[in-house]
Image (tube, helix red, strand yellow):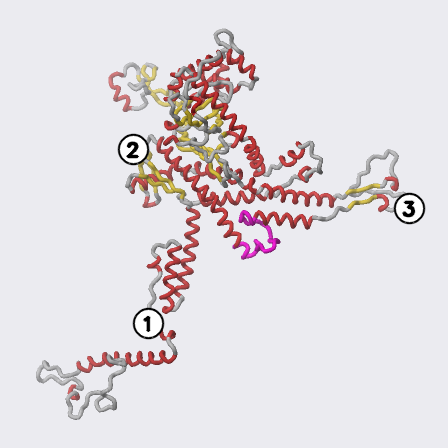
Amino acid sequence: MPLLPAPSPAAASSSAAFAAPPARGSAADILAALRAKAALVRKRRKTPLEDALAADGGTRAVRLVQWARTQKAGYDAGLVQWRANRLKWSQEAQDIFDHRARARREKAEVEDALSIFEMANDSVNIVASLAEFAAAQAEQDIYGGEPWFAANPVGRADTKLADDIQHHLQWTFRDGRFVDAQCLGIDQAVTLGECFIKTLYATDVDEHEAATPCLHADGQPVVDALGEYVTSDAQVKKMGRRLKGKLEWKEVYETRQTIIRQGVEAVPIHFHDISFREDAPELDLRHTNVYVSVEMSTFEAMRRFHLSKEDAVRLARCAETRICSDEEAQRERTADATVTCAPAEEPLGEVEAEQLLNTRVRLIEAYIRADVTGTGKEARMCMVFPPYHEDWIIWADYLANISPKAELPIKCDVWEPVPHRLYGRGFFSKYAYLQTATDNLWNQVNFRNEMHANPLTAVHEENLQTDEDGGAMVIGPGKTLKPKAGKRLGDCIEFALLPDADSRSLELFQTGMQLAQLRSGITSASQGDLSSVPESNTATGIKSLISRAAVLLKKPIRRLRRSKGRGFSYAVKLHYANFDRAEAFVWGEGHNKELVTITPEHVRDLDIDVEMLLTQEQNQNKLQGAQVMMQQLQGYSGMPETDKAGARVGVVQALKALEFSNAEEMVRKPVVTLESCLPLLPPEEAQKLKGLMALQQQQEQAAQQQPGAEAQAPDQGAAPGAPPMPGAGMAGAPGMMPPGAGMPGAAAPIPGAPGLA
């Protein structure tokens, strides 16, 4: 079943409060229990938890709402300062700094001089620039590429199903609504420190009437056995002879339903709309209950919670009821409708009831873990009740019936954790001191500039000729003054020159800018006046800052990636838990297009492992790795072959570190020859090796010539009378000697032959 769209705060509490049914006490409690039971009984369709609460007589339902309101009030009291800080930082993110001057004015007992913010309250908003950069970097790393996730079914070795699920999820979230909500959550987490996101399965259905051609018999529309209008020839053939009377086609108004949107949605929750136990280690029902305030129309509440019209009107009246005193509330609760009727309980006319049904109401949705049925066992559940007045459970059910594995549908994405707190810390909290200090200096410089342009002026009116009617003297452009006789203009007007401290203030201002840059690692427009800090407008400074920013921002972005991955994993499970139809879509482009079909049978009871890929960051790392690989191979190819033998091991290891799986194949082995080894030998040994190589070359040439001489010998099998081959008679001529015979040293071994010393 789809989750209810909600937003509200809560915290964990002991289940002992519901160990046994509370004893019936005053008439107010008895009346409230009867009304609560009546509301549950009148429901058109009840959930298992509502049925259990109705069987108790309504007492447990009343006590459950009272306990939940009390716990929520305790949570809200502990979150007062937390909400005040979030309100201030959200305003500063929008360049609204009225709270600085207002805070000073509210301290009436302050006797020191007024703050500069009382006279000038401008801001350069350094923290906003840092937060915008960090949010843009996180959004680019997590959702900057396609696909930005990988989904694999667990427990089924089906490659085709795995590919189909991956493609189906990409096709389902193709409109970007889910990503837009997640990016809005990133902005909120960076600015405030955390973001609460509710994931729900929503179905938006529009019901309307439209004209459609229908078969009429004697002026009345014809309906088939299913009660539907006969609008086609096929339906007419099925009815056959049952059609009698004058038949004709006319238009009739038919009620139609159009599904506008159906699927998983992510809704960021405002910090005013959620309550929880702030010292809980994490947002989980094991540690804290959660209460969310949600607003909807009365008709939507009537449809979603299966309320009767009577209860829907009661809900609308409850929502518009003004906050009254405890005495008035007690009097209303104890009033017996059968004896006397309070003004708020008077019967309504039809027009008044319709007006109330078109109003909007604000309700509390609670996610709690407690024993509410008296069985002695805790259970996770979700219930909806009015924020005040009525002790009435509008809707309730076990969490396992509406959420996969009874998982809390609200996730908290933290930018930077705060010790022993559920929430986190953002840029406006971390750099609040820097924001105030730099804005203080900036406003002082601007204020002094205005004072220098409009200096303090003293007028000696006794030295001026004035009219009898008098009046205040105003000095402006074109103003003419008439000094008295013997007086100069300097005797009439004096100006006070203020000391010029702007240069020192600007130095401090720039120091603050660089401190923010140094701590965050995010570059700014500063020019590096700090000693031992590389200037950001130089190559060394830019390289240092970029590497520092890459390291400092990776930690919160990785944390955000893991949190977003858990949230998206729940969204996928919720989507397929409510998947009740077959969907067919075309995947691919050009000749690679294919029709993919997903049915509920494919994904029923299927656990899916989801991983956030950080595609943009991986692509950037791959690009940098490819550039380094090209540099390594270029340097390797330029080495002498004799040097490559030792350098190849290091190049292969470097490529493996860059995650190239075929590094051994990418780097060829060196080809070493005797000629390439000559530069490595001493000069004497090199000369000897050259002589040996020359003699070896001569021997190879002689071996190639010897088979040619033997081919010139007379062919023993030649035909008689054949002419001798040229030079054939020289082989056995008297006095002829074989080559080299009689030459000095002919019997000496040939250099380079076997046996060479």
Do tag 3 and tag 2 residues touch (Cβ < 8 Å)?
A: no
Mark 2 falls on what kind of element? Answer: helix
Front residue (pair 204, 372): 372
Task: Specify which label sits upstream in the sequence, 3 or 2.
Answer: 3
Q: Secondary structure at mark 3?
A: loop
Instruction: Kindly indicate the quadrant of the structure image that contains residue 369.
Output: top left
Q: Quadrant of the N terminus?
A: top left
Is 26 one of the magenta-colored residues?
no
Residue 549 location (% of width, % of height): 51, 49
Task: Specify the farthest residue to the right.
Answer: 485
Mark carried by residue 673? 1
Q: Is residue 545 left or right of residue 226?
A: right
How far is mark 1 from mark 3, CA to CA? 110 Å
620 up-or-down from 219: above or below: below
Tell me which secondary structure the magenta stretch mostly adopts: loop
Which residues, given as a range, are shown in magenta? 517-543
Disc 3 marks which amino acid? Answer: Gly
Tell which of 442 and 477 is nearer to you.
442
- Between disc 1 and disc 3, the foreground one is 1
Magenta stretch: includes residue 540: yes
- Between disc 3 and disc 2, the foreground one is 2
Q: Which residue is mark 3?
A: 486
- The disc placed on residue 601 is 2
Describe residue 279's horizontal placement relative to residue 438 as left or right. left
